[in-house]
Amino acid sequence: KAGVTQTPRYLIKTRGQQVTLSCSPISGHRSVSWYQQTPGQGLQFLFEYFSETQRNKGNFPGRFSGRQFSNSRSEMNVSTLELGDSALYLCATTEEGDTGELFFGEGSRLTVL
Amino acid sequence: AQSVTQPDIHITVSEGASLELRCNYSYGATPYLFWYVQSPGQGLQLLLKYFSGDTLVQGIKGFEAEFKRSQSSFNLRKPSVHWSDAAEYFCAVGTGGFKTIFGAGTRLFVKA
């Protein structure tokens, strides 16, 4: 089975722009979670999707949004980028979600200048 | 509130020495506990998990962890560290609300 695929791997944006990141889960995985990773902060939970529905979301401003498509692929969007949004954004997938093992992609590294 | 604390930001051990990484959690019910490892430029990989039963769990790469309910801890151990174990290690709690909470991580350095 192919692993979790995240695109793009690296990107540079300037303040005020917006960005869209994509995540393709492992075949058969219907739950997709997104995390923001910054040095010293660990992984901060953004949101989780299952069958195109957001089931949980973290404590991030409304500039951070996501969606999931019928094929379980997911996108997250960050609008009006700020310098503090520079981070590694990780996608993690699992079959049903909740308590099982998360399978991670390699992440999309966003730099905001 | 649910939380995971990894008190050590970084640890340095000599190759061949034993290792213990600490993890404490705050959660109302019996948690689902995990340890993940992240090598540079990579995503996270599961080392081991605890759901119920035997409180000493074995994982991949020779790692083990022990769940101690009385101490709200889930420390990771390895009897003999190899240079390839240098990485960042994350303890995590599955909250049952379609959300896994991670600690801030412990970076392991291995000296020859």
Image: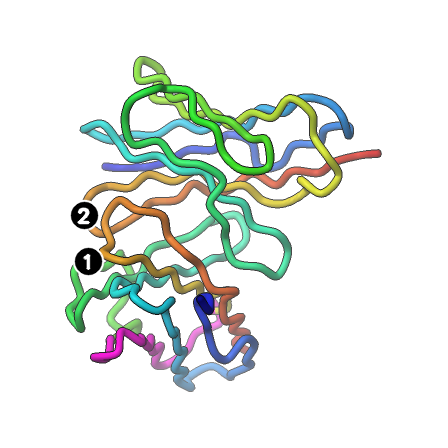
- Amino acid at circle 2: Gly
Q: Which residue is mark 1?
A: A56
Pointer 2 chain: B
Q: Position of residue A20 (x, y in %)?
A: 38, 82
Report the residue at 53% width, 70% height from top.
A109
Between B34 and A29, the residue placed more toward the observer is A29
Q: Position of residue B60 (x, y in %)?
A: 54, 37
Using a 10 Å C-alpha cutoff, classify the residue at mark 1 as few (fewer than 14 neighbours), some (14 to 19) or many (20 or more).
Answer: some
Which mark identifies residue A72?
Answer: none
A71 in magenta: yes
Between B78 and B21, the residue placed more toward the observer is B78
Position of the N terminus of chain A by quadrant? bottom left
Helix, strand or loop status at disc 2: loop
Question: Along the horizontal axis of the image, is B96 left or right of B56?
Answer: left
Using a 10 Å C-alpha cutoff, classify the residue at mark 2 as few (fewer than 14 neighbours), some (14 to 19) or many (20 or more).
Answer: few
Q: Quadrant of residue B53?
A: top left
- Amino acid at circle 1: Asn
Q: What number of labels is visible?
A: 2
Q: Position of residue A105 (x, y in %)?
A: 47, 64
Report the residue at 46% width, 45% height from top.
B46
Pointer 1 chain: A
Asked whether the residues under the numbered discs 1 and 2 touch, taking CB atoms below 8 Å apart as contact, a structural biologist would say yes
Q: Which residues are magenta?
A: A68-85
A63 in magenta: no
Q: Which residue is mark 2?
A: B97
